[in-house]
């Protein structure tokens, strides 16, 4: 499997990074272990998680995803075979305030290390900028963590253009750690933010780009086509907003291209994203072994220029 270097980091990521939000949410611990085993067997050796996963699941506390991954790493003895990305800065309570203060980030990182049962985190993201903490204070926390060997590289997710620019400027001026990876929401249904400034910014600063919600919370798999399809589904809160004229237009084009190539709609959506300028490796999740087949289809898929453009036209914003 051809690996992709993430920005200036030492991390070589697979072409698709597995999203660990499903662990403890749509997959229980036993199912998660089976999925993690298969991921490693297939070569998908980078997992993206966060301290808040899976706080939105009924009866499941935040931190469950990290705990399951940690148990699996310890049980299988695979720390040296897996790359772990996790995040901090969002509230562990649903709807709570974000916090990127130095003390909070230091404690959040220690808590993640304990849940993951590992000595260091390969890539640690500021999950959500609180907009108030001086960026220098946040970066000073990472300086301590990197010096102590507890974090190897850092990245930023859900940042405004101005705050991310300020963070890079301060890092250079104060000789503090620099964000090396940017994690935006980007997919066929959510294009505007990344395409308006994120792509150019990432290129200018040589940032690796790992978009989340690559399949628009499952909408781009084609399984949600009418309101009743969402009933009883865990991802309703994230995906139902796409069920509109634009969304159905995108699904129609995905249907046409997937049928032509004999692959899934998910594979086409992932293939499109992987080919978009500025993207290093998208993040996608799966709950079944068969879903991972779409990953391989996407990696092998060769979309024509006209197919790429037809998806661009259908998803115009």
Image: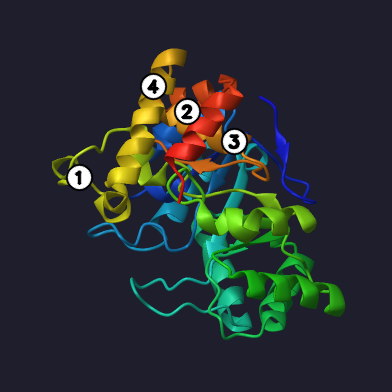
Q: Which residue is mark 2?
A: 268
Q: Secondary structure at mark 4?
A: helix
Which residue matches tag 1? Answer: 230
Compared across the picture, whether 80 is left or right of 296 comes to right
The one nearer the camera, 195 or 183, is 195
Res 256 label: 4
Q: CA distance from mark 1 to mark 2?
A: 22 Å
Residue visible at 59% across and 75% down in the picture: 105
Residue at (45%, 25%) from the top-left corner?
Answer: 294
* CA separation in Å, label 3 and label 4: 19 Å
On the rendered image, what quadrant is the N terminus found in?
A: top right
At which x and y percent is residue 19?
48, 45
Residue 85 place in picture, x, y as percent: 59, 52
- 159 sits left or right of 236 in the view: right
Residue at 34 percent of width and 44 percent of height: 246
Secondary structure, mark 3, is: helix
Q: Earlier in the sequence, mark 3 or mark 1?
A: 1
Label 1: state its secondary structure.
Answer: helix
């Amino acid at each position: 499997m051809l690996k992709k270097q993430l920005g200036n980091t030492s991390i070589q990521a697979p072409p698709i990074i597995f999203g660990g939000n499903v662990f403890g949410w749509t997959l229980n611990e036993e199912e998660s272990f089976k999925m993690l085993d298969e991921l490693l067997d297939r070569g998908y050796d980078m997992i993206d998680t966060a301290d808040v996963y899976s706080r939105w699941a009924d009866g499941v506390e935040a931190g469950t995803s990290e705990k399951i991954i940690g148990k699996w790493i310890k049980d299988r003895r695979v720390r040296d075979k897996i790359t772990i990305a996790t995040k901090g800065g969002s509230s562990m309570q649903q709807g709570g305030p974000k916090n990127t203060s130095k003390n909070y980030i230091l404690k959040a990182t220690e808590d993640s290390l304990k849940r993951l049962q590992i000595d260091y985190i390969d890539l640690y993201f500021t999950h959500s900028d609180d907009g108030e903490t001086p960026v220098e204070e946040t970066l000073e926390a990472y300086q301590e963590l990197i010096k102590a060997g507890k974090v190897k590289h850092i990245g930023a997710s859900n940042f405004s253009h101005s705050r991310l620019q300020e963070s890079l400027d301060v890092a250079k001026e104060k000789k503090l750690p620099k964000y090396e990876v940017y994690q935006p929401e980007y997919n066929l249904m959510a294009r505007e933010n990344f395409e308006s400034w994120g792509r150019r910014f990432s290129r200018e600063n040589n940032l690796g780009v790992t978009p989340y919600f690559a399949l628009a919370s499952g909408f781009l798999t084609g399984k949600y086509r009418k309101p009743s399809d969402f009933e009883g589904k865990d991802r309703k809160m994230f995906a139902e907003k796409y069920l509109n004229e634009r969304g159905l237009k995108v699904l129609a084009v995905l249907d046409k291209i997937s049928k032509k190539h004999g692959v899934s709609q998910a594979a086409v959506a992932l293939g499109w994203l992987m080919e978009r300028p500025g993207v290093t490796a998208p993040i996608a999740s799966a709950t079944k072994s068969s879903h991972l087949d779409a990953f391989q289809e996407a990696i092998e898929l060769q979309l024509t220029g006209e197919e790429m453009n037809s998806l661009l036209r259908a998803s115009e914003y």
